[in-house]
Image (cartoon, rainbow, N blue to C red):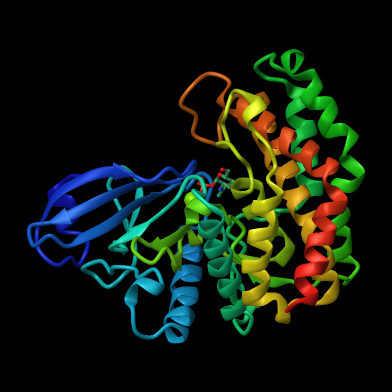
C-alpha cells in the first residue's frame, strides 16, 4: 500500500511518512507505519487464502479486544487497539483485492523470538494465562472458527496422508524417517480430540497460536503488556494453548534450526512456563485440563511438525519460506522436540502436579 492509499484509508494521527516491513509471522505480512507527528502504527495485510472470511475474523477481533479493554483499564498498551478506517470500518480492501488492517503500535515493548532467560518465558506464560482467564466469561459460541479444524489433530493426519499420497513434488522419498515418525504416533495424536468429543475436556476461548513472539513485554520491566496475533482466537483447548507455547519457547533453538544437536527441550523453561501459566489461570482449569497439559505440549509439537511436513510434501503453499527445504527443516526440529519430550515424559508430568499443588 502506498502512502497516499494509506492516508486515505485509515484514521491516523498525521500524514504517514514511512511504511517498513516488520514482524516474523509465517502467514500475514506486517509493516510499521510512522506519521509526520511521529505516531507509529502496525499495518497488516490479512492472508485471505488462509483466512477465508475476513469479515468474521475481524468481528472476532473487535469483540475480543473490546472485552479485554474493559478488563484492562488504564494503560492502552495492555490490549491491542484497532485503528478504524475513514469510513468507520476496521479493514480496507485495495483495488488489487488485498485486505489491510491497522493497530496502534505498542510503544516501549519487546517481542522475543527466543526467551533470553527463564523470567521472560515465565512472563509470557503469565500473559497467556491471564488471556485465558480474562476470556473465561466471554461467550465462546459468538466467535466464528476462523480456520475450521485448526487444532484437530485427527484432521491434520488426514491432510498429511492426502499430501503423502499425492506427493506432488516427489519429495516423500527424502523424508521417509519423518513420515515414519508421524505414522507411528497416529493413535496418540488423536487423544485430546477424542477426550473433547467424549465431553472430558471443556471448550474454552483460546488463542491457538501462543508462540513467544505473540506476546509483547514492557521493554523496561519485562512484564507482560499484551497478547497479539488474535486471528485464531476461537473455541479450543486450554492444554493446546499451553502446549503451543512450550513447543516454541521451551526449545533451546529456533523453530527452523538446521543443526538438530542444538535443538533440545528444556525442562527448566518448561517449569518456568508452567509456574507462570498456572499462577494466572490454574484455579479456573478443571483437573483433566491440568492433567493433560504435558499431552498438550507433546501433541501441539507433533501437530506443528506434521503441518510443516504436509506443506513440504504439498509444495510449500501455506507457510512462508525463505529457503529450500525450509518446511522440512522446521518439521525436523519439531520431531526432535517430541522425542525429547517422550524421554522426559515423567518429569513433565511431575512438574505439572508439583506446581499445581502449590497454587
Ligand atoms: C503460523 O503466522 P504465525 O507465524 O504467527 C501458524 C501457526 C503455527 C506457526 C508456526 C494461522 O503462525 O499455527 O504454529 O506459524 N498460523 C496459522 O510457527 O496457521
Ligand atoms: Mg504470529
The reply to whether residue 48 is visible in this rendering is: yes
Residue at 22 percent of width and 63 percent of height? 10
Q: Quadrant of the C terminus?
A: bottom right
Which of the 4 image quadrants contains residue 301? top right
Q: Quadrant of the N terminus?
A: top left
Nearest to the observer: residue 297 or residue 265: 265
Residue at 17 percent of width and 54 percent of height? 34
Residue 65, given in percent of the width and then of the height, sits at 45, 74
Residue 353, given in percent of the width and then of the height, sits at 83, 67
Nearest to the observer: residue 169 or residue 211: 211
Residue at 53 percent of width and 53 percent of height? 212
Tell me if 250 is positioned left or right of 176 in this view: left
Q: How many marks?
A: 0
In the rendered image, the vertical position of residue 315 relative to residue 150, given as above or below? above
Residue 41, given in percent of the width and then of the height, sits at 25, 59
The reply to whether residue 241 is visible in this rendering is: no
In the rendered image, the vertical position of residue 182 relative to residue 93, given as above or below? above
Nearest to the observer: residue 149 or residue 249: 249
In the rendered image, the vertical position of residue 323 relative to residue 227, given as above or below? above
Residue 94, given in percent of the width and then of the height, sits at 28, 49
Which of the 4 image quadrants contains residue 58? bottom left
Residue at 78 percent of width and 39 percent of height? 340
In the rendered image, the vertical position of residue 84 relative to residue 157, given as above or below? below
Amino acid at each position: 500500500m502506498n502512502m497516499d492509499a494509506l492516508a486515505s484509508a485509515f484514521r491516523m494521527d498525521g500524514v504517514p511518512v514511512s511504511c517498513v516491513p516488520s514482524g516474523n509471522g509465517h502467514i500475514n505480512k506486517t509493516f510499521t507505519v510512522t506519521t509526520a507527528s511521529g505516531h507509529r502504527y502496525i499495518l497488516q495485510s490479512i492472508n485471505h487464502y488462509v483466512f477465508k472470511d475476513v469479515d468474521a475474523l475481524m468481528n472476532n477481533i473487535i469483540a475480543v479486544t473490546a472485552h479485554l479493554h474493559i478488563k484492562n483499564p488504564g494503560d492502552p498498551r495492555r490490549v491491542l487497539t484497532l485503528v478504524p478506517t475513514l469510513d468507520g470500518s476496521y479493514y480496507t480492501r485495495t483495488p488489487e483485492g488485498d485486505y489491510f488492517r491497522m493497530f496502534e503500535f505498542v510503544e516501549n515493548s519487546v517481542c522475543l523470538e527466543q526467551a533470553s532467560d527463564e523470567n521472560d518465558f515465565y512472563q509470557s506464560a503469565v500473559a497467556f494465562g491471564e488471556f485465558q482467564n480474562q476470556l473465561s466469561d466471554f461467550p465462546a459460541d459468538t466467535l466464528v472458527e476462523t480456520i475450521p479444524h485448526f487444532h484437530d489433530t485427527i484432521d491434520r493426519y488426514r491432510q498429511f496422508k492426502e499430501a503423502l499420497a499425492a506427493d506432488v513434488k516427489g519429495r516423500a522419498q527424502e523424508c521417509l524417517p519423518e513420515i515414519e515418525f508421524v505414522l507411528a504416533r497416529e493413535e496418540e495424536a488423536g487423544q485430546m480430540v477424542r477426550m473433547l468429543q467424549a465431553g472430558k475436556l471443556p471448550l474454552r476461548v483460546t488463542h491457538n497460536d501462543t508462540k513467544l513472539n505473540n506476546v509483547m513485554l514492557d521493554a523496561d520491566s519485562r512484564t507482560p503488556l499484551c497478547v497479539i496475533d488474535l486471528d485464531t482466537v476461537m473455541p479450543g483447548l486450554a492444554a493446546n494453548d499451553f502446549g503451543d507455547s512450550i513447543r516454541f519457547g521451551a526449545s533451546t533453538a529456533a523453530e527452523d534450526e538446521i543443526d538438530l544437536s542444538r535443538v533440545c527441550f528444556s525442562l527448566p523453561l518448561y517449569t518456568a512456563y508452567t509456574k507462570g501459566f498456572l499462577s494466572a489461570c490454574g484455579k479456573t482449569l478443571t483437573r483433566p485440563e491440568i492433567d493433560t497439559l504435558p499431552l498438550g505440549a507433546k501433541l501441539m509439537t507433533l501437530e506443528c511438525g506434521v503441518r510443516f511436513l504436509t506443506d513440504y510434501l504439498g509444495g510449500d503453499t501455506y507457510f512462508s519460506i525463505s529457503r529450500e527445504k525450509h518446511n522440512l527443516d522446521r518439521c525436523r526440529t519439531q520431531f526432535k522436540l517430541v522425542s525429547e519430550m517422550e524421554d522426559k515424559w515423567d518429569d513433565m508430568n511431575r512438574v505439572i502436579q508439583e506446581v499445581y499443588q502449590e497454587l
